[in-house]
Image: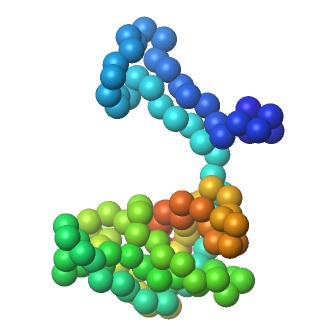
């Protein structure tokens, strides 16, 4: 599907009836890319995340800087990866300006 130009697949449970809301009976399966970046700064949270990390300012190997906020758990927002740490993120291609599209934190890279 991806090579034919599609984003991915919609997986539907064979015995499930249609529902007008989100459920585990219908799942979107999309291919993503992943890469690593260095944590440059912890950016403060707002609203629900006030007093915690809202996002991480990171720099990739090309020197591009961008924010990673999506994908961080509440625990990771309370005790975020340290500045200088290498993190892995996922994304869905690049924007017109060359930044990762819909970048989302995956994990702290194991450096051992």
The reply, left or right, for residue 101 in relation to residue 82 is right
Q: Quarter holding the C terminus?
A: bottom right
Is residue 24 placed above or below 107 in the rendered structure?
A: above
Q: Quarter holding the N terminus?
A: top right
Is residue 17 placed above or below 52 in the rendered structure?
A: above
What residue is drawn where x is 30% and y is 83%?
44
Residue 92 drawn at (x, y percent): 62, 55
Residue 78 drawn at (x, y percent): 25, 76
Is residue 69 placed above or below 62 in the rendered structure?
A: above
Quadrant assignment, res 2: top right
Quadrant assignment, res 24: top left
What residue is drawn where x is 66% and y is 65%?
95
What residue is drawn where x is 70% and y is 36%?
6
Q: Nearer the viewer, residue 49 or 13?
A: 49
Residue 111 drawn at (x, y percent): 55, 80
In the displayed orientation, state which residue is furthest to the right: 3
Q: Is residue 86 visible?
A: no
């Amino acid at each position: 599907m991806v090579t034919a130009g599609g984003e991915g697949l919609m997986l539907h449970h064979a015995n499930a009836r249609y529902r007008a809301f989100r459920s585990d009976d219908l799942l979107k399966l999309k291919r993503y890319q992943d890469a690593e970046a260095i944590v440059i700064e912890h950016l403060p949270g707002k609203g629900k995340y006030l007093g915690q990390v809202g996002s991480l300012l990171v720099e990739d190997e090309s020197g591009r800087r961008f924010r990673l906020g999506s994908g961080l758990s509440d625990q990771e927002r309370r005790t975020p990866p340290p500045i200088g740490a290498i993190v892995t993120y996922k994304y869905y291609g690049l924007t017109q300006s060359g930044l990762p599209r819909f970048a989302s934190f995956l994990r702290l890279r194991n450096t051992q």
